[in-house]
Amino acid sequence: MRMSKAITIAAFLLIISGGCYKNEPVPVAAFTYTGTNEFKIPCRITFNNNCVNSFHWEWNFGDDSVSSAQAPVKYYTRPGSYVVTLRAYTDSYKEWATAAQTIVISDTVH
């Protein structure tokens, strides 16, 4: 019994001292973007990552395409209204924040 209790206590202390959860600052998700061709198709959008306290990113461009790049470039070839979402994670992925913006891409025919 003594050995079992000692192992339990040792395991508990290892978990606590090992920091199974890092005390990381909560991230802040933010981005800006610029586009070519006056936001008419075909349009190249450059996303500028303005996140704070983040080490990993998940971008969803509103057209079923995604990226994990820090500052991706996206080509839109169809007109439409796209909700772009950025999720910013801490190094351990324990904390995250989300930012979203709508981008409107117009048709080239007027």
Image (cartoon, rainbow, N blue to C red):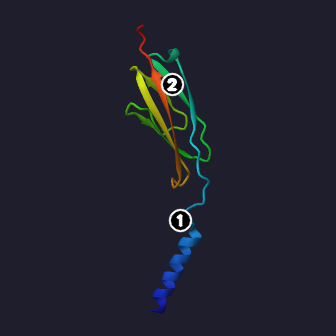
The CA distance from mark 1 to mark 2 is 39 Å
Q: Residue at x 53, y 65 (%)?
A: 20
Q: Amino acid at mark 1?
A: Cys
Q: Residue at x 53, y 46 (%)?
A: 97
Instruction: Provide residue 37's location: percent of width, then percent of height.
Output: 51, 15
Q: Dot 1: what SS?
A: loop
Residue extending furthest toward the bottom: 1
Image quadrant containing the C terminus = top left
Would you place residue 42 above or below residue 102 in this image? above
- On residue 45, the disc is 2
Image quadrant containing the N terminus = bottom left
Structural crowding at the residue carrying mark 2, measured as other residues with C-alpha within 10 Å and reported as few (<14), some (14–19) or many (≥20): some
Q: Amino acid at mark 2?
A: Ile
Structural crowding at the residue carrying mark 1, measured as other residues with C-alpha within 10 Å and reported as few (<14), some (14–19) or many (≥20): few
Q: Earlier in the sequence, mark 1 or mark 2?
A: 1
Which of 54 and 103 lies nearest the eye of the viewer?
103
Which of 35 and 101 lies nearest the eye of the viewer?
101
Instruction: Provide residue 33's location: percent of width, then percent of height.
Output: 55, 28
Q: Residue at x 45, y 20 (%)?
A: 105
Taking 53 as reference, is 69 left or right? left
Q: Residue at x 49, y 83 (%)?
A: 7
Badge count: 2
Disc 1: which residue: 20
Would you place residue 82 above or below residue 37 in this image? below
Disc 1 and disc 2 in contact, CB within 8 angstroms: no
Figure quadrant of residue 32: top right
Figure quadrant of residue 83: top left
Q: Dot 2: what SS?
A: strand
Instruction: Provide residue 53's location: percent of width, then percent of height.
Output: 61, 47
Taking 43 as reference, is 90 left or right? right
